[in-house]
Image (spheres, rainbow, N blue to C red):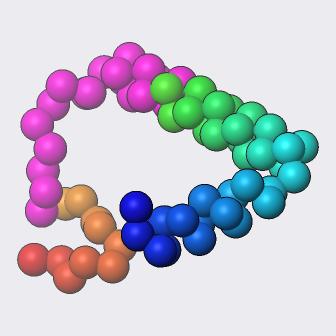
């Protein structure tokens, strides 16, 4: 393990347990929301339709 990893581990150990639990809870609720959203997308009528990349807008990328 290099020095940066060991420093990061030391910082993590200093985080209060209550805050760690809060972060874990937030992670769980976020994962749950993502799973629910994926389920809703899969139930959509046109979920299996092929994507038309010419009409999609990707923020931060130049349109082609």
- The part of the image, by quadrant, that contains residue 50 is top left
- Residue 33 against residue 26 in the figure, above or below: above
Viewer-proximal residue among 56 and 1: 1
* Left or right of residue 51, residue 45 in this image: right
The percent position of residue 64, horizontal first and vertical second, equals: 10, 77
Q: Is residue 49 among what the camera can see?
A: yes
Magenta-colored stretch includes residue 42: yes
* Left or right of residue 60, residue 54 in this image: left
Magenta-colored span: 36-54
- Residue 54 against residue 50 in the figure, above or below: below
Q: Is residue 33 among what the camera can see?
A: no
Q: Report the label total.
A: 0
- Outermost residue toward the top in this view: 43
* Left or right of residue 4, residue 63 in this image: left
The percent position of residue 36, horizontal first and vertical second, equals: 53, 24
The percent position of residue 37, horizontal first and vertical second, equals: 50, 30
Q: Residue at x 47, y 74 (%)?
A: 3
* Left or right of residue 11, residue 47 in this image: left
Q: Residue at x 28, y 66 (%)?
A: 57
- The part of the image, by quadrant, that contains residue 25 is top right
Magenta-colored stretch includes residue 14: no
Viewer-proximal residue among 15 and 33: 15
- Residue 29 against residue 39 in the figure, above or below: below
Q: Residue at x 48, y 66 (%)?
A: 5
The percent position of residue 30, horizontal first and vertical second, equals: 62, 38
């Amino acid at each position: 393990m290099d020095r940066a990893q060991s420093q990061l581990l030391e910082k993590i150990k200093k985080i209060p347990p209550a805050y760690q639990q809060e972060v874990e809870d937030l992670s769980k609720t976020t994962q749950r929301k993502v799973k629910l959203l994926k389920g809703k997308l899969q139930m959509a009528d046109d979920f299996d339709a092929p994507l038309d990349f010419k009409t999609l807008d990707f923020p931060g990328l130049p349109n082609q």
